[in-house]
Amino acid sequence: MPILKLEGVTYRYKNKYQSVEAVKNVNYEFERGKVYAIVGKSGSGKTTLLSLMAGLALPGEGQVYYNGRSTKDMDRDRYRRDEVAVIYQTFNLFPMLNVLENVMYPLQLRGIGGQQAKERAKEMIAAVGLTDVVYRRYPAMLSGGERQRVAIARALAADVKIIFADEPTGNLDVENSDRVIDLLFDLCHKRGYCVIVVTHDPDIAGKADVVIRMQDGCLAGETLNRNGQ
């Protein structure tokens, strides 16, 4: 049974001037233990599809199923808190929380607090290549690359089943990009996560188990790399 299944997923943006069909009748199944790279030109519907799968919005038509249950029939706040994590291109860190507090936040939402949350946060901060020097720093005190790594550490700290990532290496140099890619792939292949990445990064697409191509809101095809066969 796939962990995530899309059936006829369609989404339209509407305003008083026009209606744009951003995602058109997408059908697909995602499995645990695989990294999926969603590629395509800007405006092809990649990020919109990611938002629908992450429960940030509901499809206008069709269904997104998580473990056989439609996101239309579930508490989507709980789904986003307990089952999935999203790594945003724009970081979405809390400006009034320091680095350690930002990474601890999803754990605290799930009732994990105190020393356990702190140790898990420290572990994930180290995993993305940051040191204890940044623990008490606030997002405004960090570089763009450091903020991106904190955002990734926060997503990983939640220990969820699915990780969605929107251009996770877009603000990183080559060394830290490679570190993040290796970490995501390790979590997927060794711990059974499902990782779904929207990317223009050829390194991610080249290493992904499955590459999904989108064009004009439609799923235009897929490529199975060696690990995905």
Image (cartoon, rainbow, N blue to C red):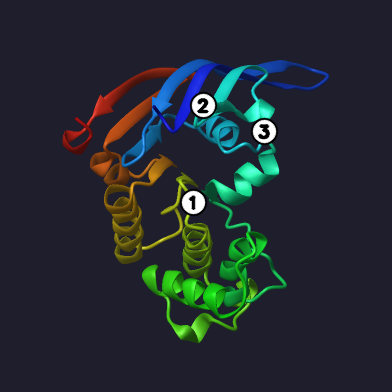
Q: Residue placed at 51% from the left, 57% from the top?
A: 155
Tell me which amino acid carries mark 3.
Answer: Met
Question: In the rendered view, would you say 153 is above or below 38?
Answer: below
- Badge 1 local density, few (<14 within 10 Å), some, or many (20+)? some
Location of residue 173 (image quadrant): bottom left
| N-term-proximal mark, 3 vs 2 | 2
Mark pair 1, 2: CA separation: 17 Å
Q: Residue at x 45, y 72 (%)?
A: 125
Q: Can residue 198 be seen?
A: no
Residue under circle 3?
Answer: 74
Answer above or below: position of 128 versus 227.
below
Residue 10 visible? The answer is yes
Q: Residue 43: x percent and y percent?
A: 54, 28
The amino acid type found where label 1 is placed reads Val
How far is the residue under mark 1 from the one under mark 3? Answer: 17 Å
Look at the numbered disc 1 and give the secondary structure of its residue: loop
| Residue at 64% from the left image edge and 64% from the top image edge | 111
Residue 29 numbered mark, or none: none
Q: Secondary structure at mark 2?
A: loop
Q: Which mark is residue 160?
A: 1
Left or right: residue 44 versus residue 14 is left
First of labels 1, 3 by sequence position: 3
Which of the two labelled residues, at mark 1 and mark 2, occupies the earlier sequence position? 2
Residue identified by numbered label 2: 68
Q: Quadrant of the C terminus?
A: top left
The Cα atoms of the two marked residues, 3 and 2, are separated by 11 Å
Q: Is residue 145 above or below residue 122?
A: above
Amino acid type, residue under disc 2 in the picture = Gly
